[in-house]
Each structure stands twice: as structure tokens, then as C-alpha cells.
Image (cartoon, rainbow, N blue to C red):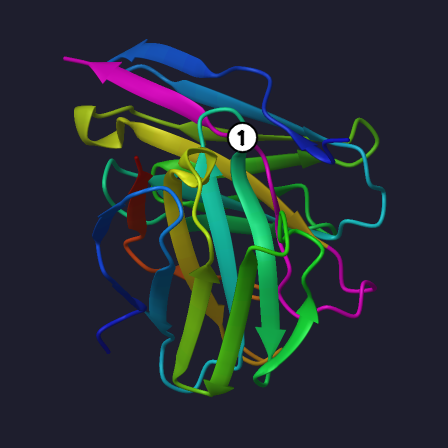
Amino acid sequence: DAGVIQSPRHEVTEMGQEVTLRCKPISGHNSLFWYRQTMMRGLELLIYFNNNVPIDDSGMPEDRFSAKMPNASFSTLKIQPSEPRDSAVYFCASTGPPSASPRDTQYFGPGTRLTVL
Amino acid sequence: DQQVKQNSPSLSVQEGRISILNCDYTNSMFDYFLWYKKYPAEGPTFLISISSIKDKNEDGRFTVFLNKSAKHLSLHIVPSQPGDSAVYFCAASDSYGGSQGNLIFGKGTKLSVKP
């Protein structure tokens, strides 16, 4: 298995532009998580989906952030409009069904490093 | 309010010695704990886990200890190797939250193992 795939790996954009980050979870996994990593806050959970349904989006910082999971193999995280304080590394992770072992183990993608100028 | 705390941002250890990384938690509902390792420019990778019904789990050079009464866990690496240099994240979950696989992460401890 290729693991969790994220694209792009690096994104540099200007303030006010729309940014879309993409994630393909591991085949057969039914939960998907989006995280943001910064020096100040560490790994923050933004939103997670279970069976393509958003379960908890309380970590989404503002209405400028939105996430979708149209099917089991694809998710997007969109920032519109982007701001310099959104600069961070964004990770996507997926996990298997409750019967999976070890339990609750999330598998992370390589991340997207976003820089907003 | 941080539910999972890693109070040491960094740790430096000599090769061959023991590395001990610590983690404290506040939520007594947590019943499963994991350690992740992260190299620069990569995503975190699962290292080892422990259920709250145990107080120790060992996998090769890595051992995790859980002290439920103190709400404390630690990761021991023996012997430490330069390739162990990475950021280590502690994470916790509870089976009663109704949320499958939702983990609460600490902020990480950067381990440097010097040759």
C-alpha cells in the first residue's frame, strides 16, 4: 500500500488566494483526520470524518477553512482567503475500523508545507 | 486546556544510554495511549502503544510504562541510537467518546542522540 498520499507537498501562495490541499487515505480506512502543525501549538486536529461524514469540526479555526470528503478515497481542505498566519504544515491521517489492531492507530501522510506571503 | 502534556520540549542523550521521554494526561477517561515518532519533512509514524489495562509494553528497544494513578506515561529507549533522533509525540484516546480513532496529541519532545 502506498500509504496516505497528500498533495501538493509544498505550496507557496499570496495572501487572499484560495488554497486547496488534497488527501488520499489508505484504502479500506474509514476515518480521516486533518491536522495543522505549528511551533506554538504543536499538532492541532482541525476536523475528522468517519465514513465520509464530518464528525467534529470544532478545530477548524475560522469560516475561511472548509473540508470535504466526497468519497472514501479523497478529501480536500480549502482555505479561502488565505492569510500569513495560516502558514504551517498540514497533515492528513487515516485509520481503519474499530477492529483494527493496534487500536486507534492513525497513519499520517507526509504533509503539505503551506507558506502564505 | 491541554489534556496531554509533554513538558520537556527537548532532550539530549549520549548514544548507547537510555532515553526517557515523559507524558502526563489529565483526562481519566483516556484508556489507550500511543507514541509517535516524527522525522523532519515526514509525517508522524506510529511507534508503540499501551492499553490502560497494562502498565508496561515492550517492543525491542522501546518500552512504554503507564502509571494510571499518576496519569503519567513514559517511553524508554535502550540503548539510544543516533537514528532515534526525532520528535516524539505522546497521544491518548478514550473508547467512550464515541469518536473512532480520535487522538489527543501532546506538543512533542525533540530527542537528540549524540554519537
Question: Image check: A96 left or right of B85?
Answer: right
For label 1, the residue is B107
Q: Residues within 10 Å of mark 1 (few under 14, many from 20)?
A: many
Tell me if residue A55 is in the magenta stretch. no
Question: Image check: B46 left or right of B99?
Answer: left
Image height of B88 relative to B52, above or below: above
Subunit under mark 1: B
Secondary structure, magenta segment, majority class: loop
Secondary structure under the numbered disc 1 in the rendered image: loop
Give the percent coordinates (x, y) of residue A41: 55, 30
Start and end of the magenta stretch? B94-115
Q: Residue at x 50, y 59 (%)?
A: A34
Give the percent coordinates (x, y) of residue A100: 53, 77
Image height of B20 relative to A85, above or below: above
Give the percent coordinates (x, y) of residue B80: 28, 24
Q: Is residue B71 visible?
A: yes
Q: Residue at x 79, y 70 (%)?
A: B98
Give the percent coordinates (x, y) of residue A113: 29, 45
Image height of B112 relative to A18, above or below: above
